[in-house]
Amino acid sequence: MSTRFHDRSSPRLDDVVSRLPSLEGVRPIVDQLLATSVPDAGRRWTASGEMGTAGSRVVDLDAMRATLGRVIESESARVVRRLERVALVTEALVDGAWDTAMALLLEEAGVLESEGRSEEARAFAEAAARLGIEEGSPRAGEALRRAARCARSCGALAEAITHYESAWHRALDHGRLTDAVIAATGRGNVSVDRGQWADADRWYHRAMEVLESEPGGVPSDEAAGLRWRLFQNLGITARERGAMAESAAWYGRAESESAGLGDPAAMIEVQNGIGQLDLARGEPRRAEVRFRRALSSLDELTAVPDAVRVAIRVNLGEALLRQGRTLEAGDAARGAEAEALRGRFFGRLPETYRLLARVVRARGEIDAFVFLDRAIDLIRAHGLPPYEEALTLRVYADLRADEGEEELAKGARERASQISDIEPDGDAK
């Protein structure tokens, strides 16, 4: 008789999920189980508890039952909405109302994307793009950009590149400067995903050239919002290329631009970026102070996604780890994990587990690889971009090399290179 469920009062998430059907239609329940799971109180202070990941958390049946109705209602409403929207698109196509059909397709793509259903959103956006191109709609570029963004979220980076570049050329051909800036910025973001910093830098500069080429070509309110992000992105690429002074100059411009906007969320993002620059310059204590201030500022805002809070907590953990404060670094990483689970930002868990793997290894634990295994599982289960797997393999390689296992380290690095064109030390946040 199996003993996996010998303690039925505290069934582990992995023990339950591994026995459920592996179907996309089951994913909402699995995600809800993950979001409502709780740490195993009986293992919390044991060695195995220290090494626990999301899969070793305990299923909270009461929480699942309490929220099941909302999950079913939400899923049912989504299916009904999608079918009704497709029926309306069909009517518009039959009537030759191309603008209406395209608007409906883009509207549904936007809703699906906001729900985290990037693959479905991509299908609607690509349908809108095809229709827009065939009928010469001015919204074709918008559809291509949304399709590109969704493809990027799904890890289909080659398709994202194709869509962004098509949107870029189309925008320039039609003199739509704002569209061109957004398309070039998005194209640069894909290069960041691949760790291709020089290429990303080129695309961000192209976006900047268009933004500054014709004064008034982009409305001033839109230009300011686009400009600070480009400054921030150029700060990132310069930092990753090792050009610290150049990076600091770009971040300084981003800081001034975001302050001029009076947008607290933008200022927090810039401060997070400057904190990462502090880390790159070997100033972890300075970075720690900046990350803590950013988290404190977040507590006063309601319009900032909790995913930002997760990212800053991970960065704070990195700053603490580099100071040798492993216990505090672990606490920061666990805080990021808890917020990611609570907010259903499962895409943020792999970077959290990469940090935890390094934290426990710094404490002398030999089995830090359990965190990296969990990161790979999550990346594949949630269809995250392949560069996340490549980054995880690089951490695996580094830890193996630290243990003198050069062959295993070499194999992991080779697999990382096969997955994504990541340049050395290319972990972008």
Image (spheres, rainbow, N blue to C red):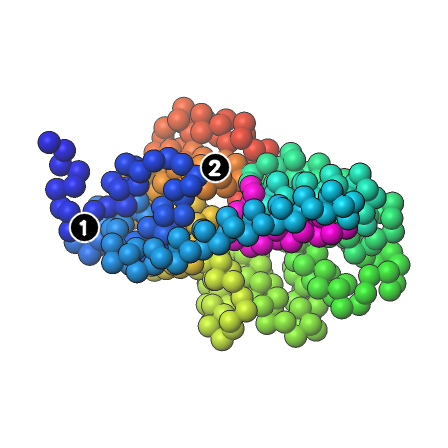
- Give how far apart the Cα atoms at labels 1 and 2 are: 31 Å
Q: Which of 216 and 279 is in front in this view?
A: 216
**Residue denoted by label 2:** 389
Q: In this view, does 233 lie to the left or right of 118?
A: right
Amino acid type, callout 2: Glu
Q: Which of 290 and 345 is in front in this view?
A: 345
| Label number found at residue 324 | none
Camera sees residue 254: yes
Q: In this view, does 305 lie to the left or right of 94?
A: left
Magenta region's main secondary structure?
A: helix
Q: How crowded is mark 1: few (under 14 residues within 10 Å), some or many (20 or more)?
A: some
Q: Which span of residues is magenta-colored?
A: 99-120
Q: Does the magenta stretch include residue 103?
A: yes
Residue at image point 58% right, 63% down: 269
Q: Does the magenta stretch include residue 42?
A: no
**Dot 1: what SS?**
loop
**Residue denoted by label 1:** 10
Residue at image point 82% right, 54% down: 177
Question: To which quarter of the image does residue 41 belong?
Answer: bottom left
Query: In which quadrant is the N terminus drawn?
Result: top left
